[in-house]
Amino acid sequence: MVLGEQGQRRDVWAFYALTAFAAVMYSVPGEWIPALAPLRLALVTSGLAAGLMVIRRLGRAEPLYLDGSRGLALIAFSTLAVASVGWSVIPEVTTATGVELLKLTAIYITFINVITTGRRLAVVCGAMVLASVVTSIGAINWYLVGEDLVEGFRARWVGVYADPNHMAMNLALVVPLAVAFVARKSSGWLWRLACLTAAILAVAAIVVSHSRGGFIGLSAAMAVWAIREKRRIQAIVVGSLFVMGLLVFAPQSFWQRNETVAEFHEDASAMGRVYAWQVASRISLDKPLLGVGAGGFRYAWPMYAPPEARRAYVAHNIFLDVIGELGWVGLLFFMVFTGGAAGGAFEASRDKEVGWLARALSASVVGYLVCDLFSGYILSAHLYVLFGLAAAAHRVARASEALDRQWGPAPSEPVVATWEGSGHAA
């Protein structure tokens, strides 16, 4: 319906590989199954998806969709990161960071070229929700057995989830998607039950991570989803159940750590953020346009930190991290990219086909950006996947709107309702 029959059929194998990558990104089997570690499944699946997509376009002389200003801004951002090796305080780290950003840019471009229908968008989001169960169970299990806890009480897991804050924000991303599936009656009761389980486990894992930023981001995401969801009463009930569960089951240590925000001067973790923000400010004053080079924030720490800040931290704010490493020029590119994808998800929320999922994606974008105000993960694959899905939702909605203008509205409301619930909207 949205991009025509040809748009629905093309890149089928690339779509399968991309769905596998979305699942591997959360389940990270190579991190806890030693035999799979050498296979590097995330790299293989993402590379296969990108390669198949490009090969098909070269074979049929089809243009590559670059997603307008936001896609070009991301390309400019990653190109600037690579170029920053010329003025970096640590060229070898900048080179590695630039290469990783190019890979993440390729993943984003692959998402917006392959996810061309509402059905594909829902399948990839569903794969992420289902795979997140593995991460949630892993973190909860480590917490219950007391394995490798940060600061003696903060749960984490393996790989990219070894940082409790990073784990919390990546799990907070899937909660609005999960509850959107739960709230959608046409999803089927078994799938809705699976998504409800995934959402509950994700919230539990966020709680035992004791991540203040993750909790704030999750709260913001759920508030945005509940306010913007068309079935508002149902959304509020679902949101209220999550709040009640949090109040009942969260351990005392979770509330105690959140209470330390008011006494941040006595909290080493909170003061680390204050010091990091001071460093970002001083870097910006010294090198406002281009920063100290991609990946160079921690290595520039001794040159800009106050005397009492002996330990080097990450920027603990993605926007300040960008300013510190790539200056205001880099921030301009990054803001065009993130703002364009976020705005696209909000605009797609009005679409009759993908609006229900676009509203969840826009909530996830808000929650993730809120988390990123307390974290600094420019190289997080989850960020580029989320924004790729948001941009894809916008593209699908615009194509659907253009088709409606060309052919006119559906003949009657019952026909639209049947089409939307049939599962063949893509």
Image (cartoon, grey):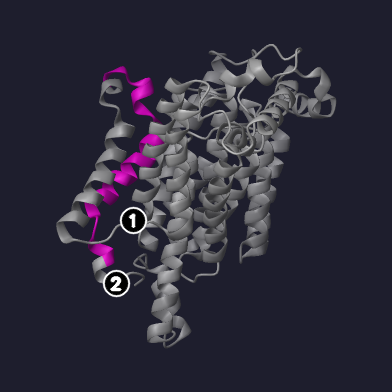
Depth order, front residue of 17/310: 310
Report whether 367 appears left or right of 28: right
The dominant secondary structure in magenta is helix
Tell me where residue 201 sits by quadrant: top right
* Residue 353 higher or lower than 16, as above or below: below
- Tell me, for residue 33, which label it has, or none: none
- The answer to which quarter of the image holds residue 120 is bottom left
Magenta span covers which residues? 7-35
Callout count: 2
133 shown above or below 164: below
- Any mark on residue 4, and which? 2
- Whether residue 360 is visible: no
Residue drawn at point x = 46 percent, y = 26 percent: 94
| Sooner in the amino-acid sequence: mark 1 or mark 2 | 2
Residue 330 appears at what percent x and percent y? 55, 42
Query: Residue 226 versus residue 112: which sits nearer the camera?
Result: 112
What number is the disc on residue 113? 1
User: Could you say where residue 149 lies in the image, as x and y percent from the top left?
Assistant: 58, 15
Closer to the eye: label 1 or 2? 1
* On-image quarter of the C terminus: bottom left
Foreground residue among 338 and 128:
338
The residue type indicated by label 1 comes to Asn
Residue type of the residue flagged with mark 2: Gly
Instruction: Quarter of the image for the N terminus: give it.
Output: bottom left
